[in-house]
Amino acid sequence: MRAGSVLRKNPKGEQGETLGLLKHLDCPYFGRGDVWENIIPSDVDNLNHDSTAREQEMRWENDYRNVISHFGGKPRGIFVVAGYAPTMCTIGNPKFVTVQSAAVRYYAPPVALIHKLDVPTIWCVTDPRCSPRFQEMTLMWSNTVPHALLSQWHCDRRFNRVVSGKKYACHAVYGACESWGDLPENRCEGNGRAVVLGHSHVKSDIKTGDASVWREVLSTHDGPVYGNGWDWAVDEGYIKKEMYGGVTSDIPGVLAEYSYCPVVSHTKGFRTGKPYVLVANGVVPVLTENYVQLWPGYPREWIWPNLPPYVEAMTWWRERMTPNFDTVDLIVDHLRAGTFQKHTYGGYRG
């Protein structure tokens, strides 16, 4: 089973990964959505931060019963494709913290379900430094600690995380999560225009390291720029104010007007999913110098700021946009055979 929050039309980011994973596994999805038929809807109607703890617990009981009824028992395991990561998601928590409505509606239901089902849980994240940090795992439900942790780092990542005063030794393994997005047919023509679309907050701790690369990109780009975290570039003169399009949720709408977009890897070894989003929208990813090593065979004459021939480059990319479910399939085999063991594929210890 796959658990999550809301799965929308034109999915992007971790939602695109979710849809790709669902199509591969052909399994039920717990949450809300409009692009997958086999959905076990979470009971969150009219639930928000002003609801009572008792009401939230009653909704969790409904979710649990619905899942058990759907499967005729407990599922063998749960895959969670995680993006948004709050520090607390339950009403009436031990710290008496008022939680956000988004956490109550979208994060608490799968976490509570994980606790009630008490089956192996595999968390799939973009960057392990953004991995689960909800305090309930320390203060309330120790069985919600991730049993496995898959990420987009092209290598194992080991780090420590303190959650509500408790230190966890965390281990993330490469799960090819960035490759799961669904790639529809796209236009095969180009207008020769390039756009910079970077939603990252380049001065945050998570994105440390890519600001210098973005300076190199922006110094050779005189077109439009969209996304979050660009105030510094406007202030420093790298982006003309009239060319900054700001934050937009209509990524397909923006990309429909362009043919090329630079791709930056903020830290060595990180496989950003941006090329998959771009190719799915008919835009050629143009790699920067710091990212070429993760795409063997990428022609050096195509490195930004050089713009490659559109049709040739799009053909090159689409030949390599093949989903890699090897790690997922191994985990599923273990779950079905009853041989899954915690920490074999990363996870938290503590």
Image: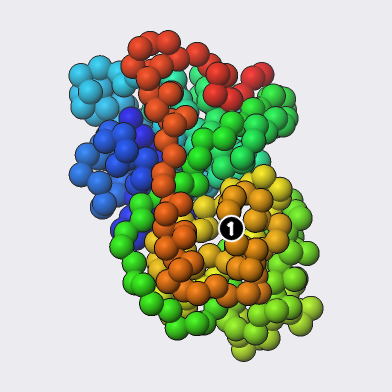
Could you say which quadrant of the image residue 229 lies in?
A: bottom right
> Between 23 and 240, which is closer to the camera in this rendering?
23
* Residue 147 percent across, percent down from the top left: 52, 22
Quadrant of the snapshot with the N terminus: top left
Left or right placement of residue 61 versus residue 309 in this view:
left
Residue 227 appears anywhere in the view: no
Q: Secondary structure at mark 1?
A: loop
Locate residue 130 relative to residue 61 in the image: left or right: right
Residue 84 in sight here: yes
The residue drawn where x is 58% and y is 25% is 346
Residue under circle 1? Answer: 298
Identify the residue shown where x is 64% and y is 35%: 155
Tell me which amino acid carries mark 1: Tyr
When the figure is inspected, residue 77 is found, relative to residue 337, above or below; the finding is below
The residue furthest bottom is 242
Direction from residue 349 to residue 89 in the image, left or right: left
**Image position of 307 (left or right of 209):** left
Name the residue nearer the viewer: 87 or 274: 274
Location of residue 190 by image quarter: bottom left
